[in-house]
Amino acid sequence: MNPLVLKLQPVTVRPHHFETPHSYLDRLCAVNVIDRRLVDSLIRTRRSRTGRPHHLALVIHELGGPHATHFARSYLRATGRRPSDVDTLLTEAYRTRLTGVRHTCTYCTAGHSVPTFDHHQFTICLKHGRWLAPDHGHEHQRQIPDPGEWVRAERRYRRAVTSGLLTRHLVDATWRIVRDQATVLGPPSWTARLRATEAQPGFVEGVDDRCALYPQTARVLHLLSGPRTWEVIDALFRSPEHLRAYLRRELDWVTGEQWVLVEALAVEVIRSRSARLQQLGVLLRSHRDEQLRRPHLPSATP
Ligand SMILES: [Zn+2]
């Protein structure tokens, strides 16, 4: 193969949900018996010649893969990020080193490991009932313990993360806070599943414990994603005791002592509130700047 000329390949593959461009190119090269190192060297040459970050995307498209915008759009949907300009977007979507680890359900990929963009859009493959082990390798994926309860939790989780009211930081903090509540304050009834899981051979911290506490985590996120909760937070953020009382009332399903959950959540929601306000301030500022930059249109009135 002439390294400067790429031919449309006879076999194409479908990209998996949120699959990274590197993973896609690996699979495309494998089915068409193309030397991946040769393709990498071509991409490096083109990048150094032009300084543009997305030649990987163009190479994929030339070989018969999806259009160059596919992975950029997929990256935006997966991460919810809004990079400031196109070059930053392309650099992030096509970077070689990935942050975080996510893999597509291995039942959906016939056992193959398919890395995806780091995202928090879903945690269970509803088709196969697989726990996708966020931040761990595909070998840690599991069948969910109870299809009814865990599928309900997954639907609740997806609604919560698409509400637009949860920052990524708050979602990550909630996982940790629910686990701390369950492990620090002894075994009330809702942590029985965690205790049973911890006692099983092969228990993996960060995988089995998160899976065991998923219904409770989704329940807390569901509460935090409600507009009513944010109205209360906006009204009570200067009055921590009233805010804690609200959280205690709403989280009364947490039997026994609730203080770890309530204290830590109160801190995190107030932090999240100020992050959202800052973000809103940046958006309003850029909107105002945009308005100021626009030439004034002539008035419609005679
Ligand atoms: Zn699946």
Image (spheres, grey):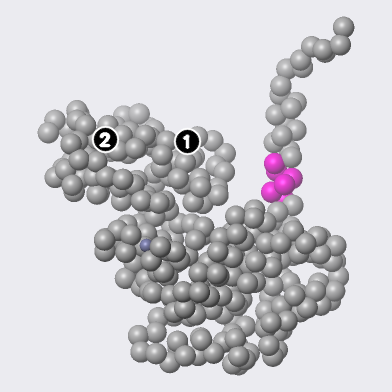
Closer to the camera in the image, 84 or 19: 19
Q: Is residue 281 magenta?
A: yes
Q: Residue at x 51, y 86 (%)?
A: 193
Location of the N terminus by quadrant is: top left
Quadrant hosting residue 255: bottom right
Badge 1 crowding class, 10 Å Cα cut-off, few under 14, some 14 to 19, many 20 or more, is few
Closer to the camera in the image, 279 or 158: 158
Mark number displayed over residue 87:
1
Span colored in magenta: 278-283
Q: Is residue 91 visible?
A: no
Q: Which residue is denoted by mark 2 in the rendering?
A: 64
> Left of 117 or right of it: where is 222?
right
| Image location (x, y in percent) of residue 62 | 27, 32
Q: Is residue 21 visible?
A: yes
* SS of the residue under disc 2: loop
Q: Is residue 251 magenta?
A: no
Between disc 2 and disc 1, the foreground one is: 2
Q: Residue at x 48, y 57 (%)?
A: 119
Distance between the alpha carbons at the discs numbered 2 and 1: 24 Å
Q: Amino acid at mark 2?
A: Gly
| Image location (x, y in percent) of residue 5 | 19, 28
Q: Residue at x 19, y 35 (%)?
A: 9
Q: Residue at x 43, y 75 (%)?
A: 144
> Left of 34 or right of it: where is 203?
right
Q: Amino acid at mark 1?
A: Asp
Quadrant hosting residue 28: top left
Q: Earlier in the sequence, mark 2 or mark 1?
A: 2
Quadrant hosting residue 254: bottom right
Closer to the camera in the image, 271 or 234: 234
Location of the C terminus by quadrant is: top right
The answer to whether the residue bearing label 1 lies less than 8 angstroms from the nearest atom of ligand 1 is no
For the residues labelled 2 and 1, say whether their Cβ atoms are less than 8 Å apart: no
